[in-house]
Structures are given as C-alpha cells and as structure tokens.
Image: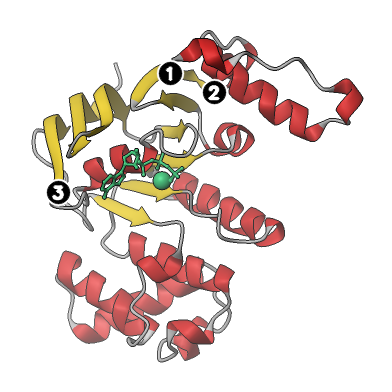
C-alpha cells in the first residue's frame, strides 16, 4: 500500500462571512501529482495556501493538515511557486542571495556552500551562465526567467512537496510551455509530490496523474486524470471539459454546453 504523505481532513476555510473551502479532504502519497482545477473564485488558492500555511491572518481555518504526523513546514517540506514571480522574489535583492538564503535557512549550509548551491539551482532551472548571474537583480531577467528563478527558490530548501498556483498564467503561450515542461521534468527527476493549481483542464491532465475538481469551495469530483476526462461524473466537470473542447473547435462543430443554472 502506498504511504499517505499529506493528509487533509475536513478542511473548512472562511474569510469573515465568505466560506471559501467547505469540508475538503484529500490525500497525497509520495510522488503523486495532483491538479486542482476550478473556475475563478472556487477556492483553489485558498486550499493550496492553507496547505502551505500561507493564508492571511483573517482566514478562519478548521480541520487538519497532516504531513507525516505533523504540520508541514514551508520551505523544507513544501515549496511554493506563485502565478507572479514578483510575489516570491525580492526586487532589491540579488537572485543568488535570495536562493542562498533559503538554502542556508533550511539546509544549514555555510554562506559559501549555499551560494554554490544557488548557482546549481539556477543551472537546473536552465538560466544560462548561471554562475555569472548570481549577482543580478530580478528586473534583469525576462518574465519566464523570473519564474524559473522563483522555481529555483521554491526548490532551494529541498522540499518534498511543490505547490504551484497557476504558475504560467501570467506568461505568454510559448514561455508557458517551457515552464510547464521544466516543472514536469524537475518534479519527475526529483521524485517530488506536486499540487498543481490551474483552471486549464488540458494543462491539468498534462501535469498531473490525478485531478480534483473544486466548485464553490467543495471538491465535487476527484480521480485519475485519464478516467476523469473520459468519464466525468459531475455536471461541472462535464461543463469544464465541454467548454475547453468548444474553445478549440470551429463554432459550427462546438458541442452543446451544460446548463450551469442547475449546478447551484
Ligand atoms: N484574503 C481574502 N479575504 C477575503 N476573501 C478572500 C480572500 N482570498 C480569497 N477570498 C475569497 O475566497 C473565495 C475563494 O478565493 P480563491 O482565491 O481561493 O479562489 P481561486 O479559485 O484561487 O480563484 P482564481 O482562479 O481567481 O485565482 C473567493 O470568494 C474569494 O473572493
Ligand atoms: Mg487563485
């Protein structure tokens, strides 16, 4: 039997009167790749950030988040990649120092070794001439490169879980593909457990072997990606799949849409 790694049980999150997450339970085993999909405002980021321990103070949380018998630690258990790299990178700090700082904090290395490790990480995320770029600032890189650097920083504490919250939505299509491919490669090579947040069902099935569909704060359907796409059970999942297909097809060949009014 595969060992459960991350166990979220009966999670509820509210912001004042807004209930963002309703009684969500999910389990991840080591090496699992789970995509969380749903439309804007469905609660994807709230769930992901609750797991990362990054919810704002005003969020009220109930339920348990267990990682090998304890709360997961940000940085060393969980690395987070956000939609916008500027959310994770400090604009006035050299990128090498930012990554080295994470390495030092979580891996207890000396500053020199941490800088060497930072260069290795920059190289791993395919920043050209990585060693010579340690002293550059974030604004000296392109948007795609910044997201690669943010990925290097997310991985710097050697986490076993990577949470990526719509990591490519702010980038153009070609760069998106490069980042998605790199992410897939690093997750596979590093044996990382992945929680990938997206509203794109195609991207979800490409990045993950499991999909959880979230609708109005509830996980309404979850399962193996292929199965879920072939035989969706919940009307909202069907609607998501049909909307995706209809966007890719000429107007005359579009499939009928599911009536969303009945989903409330
Ligand atoms: N800091 C906050 N304060 C108050 N309400 C919030 C806060 N963050 C999120 N919410 C509310 O919680 C609900 C879920 O939001 P969340 O950001 O988790 O959705 P999402 O699925 O990530 O959306 P998107 O695809 O747009 O990123 C929404 O109703 C949102 O308005
Ligand atoms: Mg979000």
Q: Assess whether mark 2 and mark 1 are in contact (beta carbons under 8 angstroms).
A: no
Which is nearer the eye, 163 or 11?
11
Counting residues from the start of the chain, the first of labels 1 and 3 encountered is 3
Question: In front here: 70 or 190?
Answer: 70
* Image position of 243 (left or right of 246): left
Task: Say what secondary structure mark 2 lies in.
Answer: helix
**Residue 222 visible in rendering:** yes
How many angstroms separate mark 1 from mark 3 (CA)? 29 Å
Please give the label number shown on residue 222: 1
Specify few, some or many for label 3: CA neighbours under 10 Å numbering under 14, 14-19, or 20 or more.
Answer: few
User: Is 100 drawn above or below residue 262 in the view shown?
Assistant: below
Q: CA distance from mark 1 to mark 2?
A: 9 Å
Nearer mark to the viewer, of 3 and 2: 3
Q: Which residue is mark 2?
A: 225
Residue 68 visible somewhere in the drawing: no
Secondary element under disc 1, as helix, strand or loop, is strand
Q: Residue at x 35, y 67 (%)?
A: 88
Who comes first in sequence, dot 3 or dot 2?
3
Q: Can you say which quadrant of the picture contains the C terminus?
A: top left
Asked if disc 3 is less than 8 Å from ligand 1, the answer is yes
Height in image: 98 above or below 2? Answer: below
Q: Are marks 3 and 2 in contact (CB under 8 Å)?
A: no
Foreground label between 1 and 3: 3
Q: Which residue is mark 3?
A: 58
Mark linked to residue 204: none
Residue 162 position in % (x across, y down):
36, 48
Query: Residue 18, position in %: x, y?
Result: 25, 35
Taking the view exactly as shown, the residue that stands out farthest to the left is 70
User: Residue, x 27% and y 30% (percent of image)?
Assistant: 21
């Amino acid at each position: 039997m595969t060992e459960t790694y991350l166990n979220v049980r009966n999670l509820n999150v509210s912001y004042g009167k807004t209930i963002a997450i309703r009684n969500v339970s999910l389990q991840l085993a080591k090496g699992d790749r789970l995509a969380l999909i749903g439309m804007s405002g469905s609660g994807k980021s709230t769930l992901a950030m609750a797991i990362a321990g990054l919810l704002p103070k005003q969020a009220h949380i109930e339920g348990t988040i267990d990682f090998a018998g304890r709360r997961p630690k940000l940085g060393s258990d969980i690395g987070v990649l956000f939609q916008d790299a500027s959310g994770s990178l400090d604009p006035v700090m050299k990128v090498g120092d930012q990554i080295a700082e994470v390495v030092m904090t979580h891996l207890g290395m000396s500053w020199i070794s941490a800088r060497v490790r930072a260069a290795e990480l920059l190289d791993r995320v395919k920043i050209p001439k990585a060693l010579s770029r340690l002293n550059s600032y974030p604004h000296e890189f392109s948007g795609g490169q910044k997201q690669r650097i943010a990925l290097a920083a997310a991985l710097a504490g050697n986490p076993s879980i990577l949470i990526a919250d719509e990591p490519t939505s702010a980038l153009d299509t070609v760069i998106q593909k490069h980042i998605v491919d790199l992410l897939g490669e690093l997750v596979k090579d590093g044996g990382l457990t992945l929680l990938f947040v997206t509203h794109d069902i195609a991207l979800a099935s490409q990045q993950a072997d499991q999909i959880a569909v979230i609708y109005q704060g509830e996980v309404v359907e979850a399962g193996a990606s292929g199965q879920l796409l072939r035989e969706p059970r919940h009307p909202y999942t069907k609607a998501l799949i049909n909307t995706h297909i209809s966007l890719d097809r000429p107007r005359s060949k579009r499939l009928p849409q599911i009536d969303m009014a009945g989903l409330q």
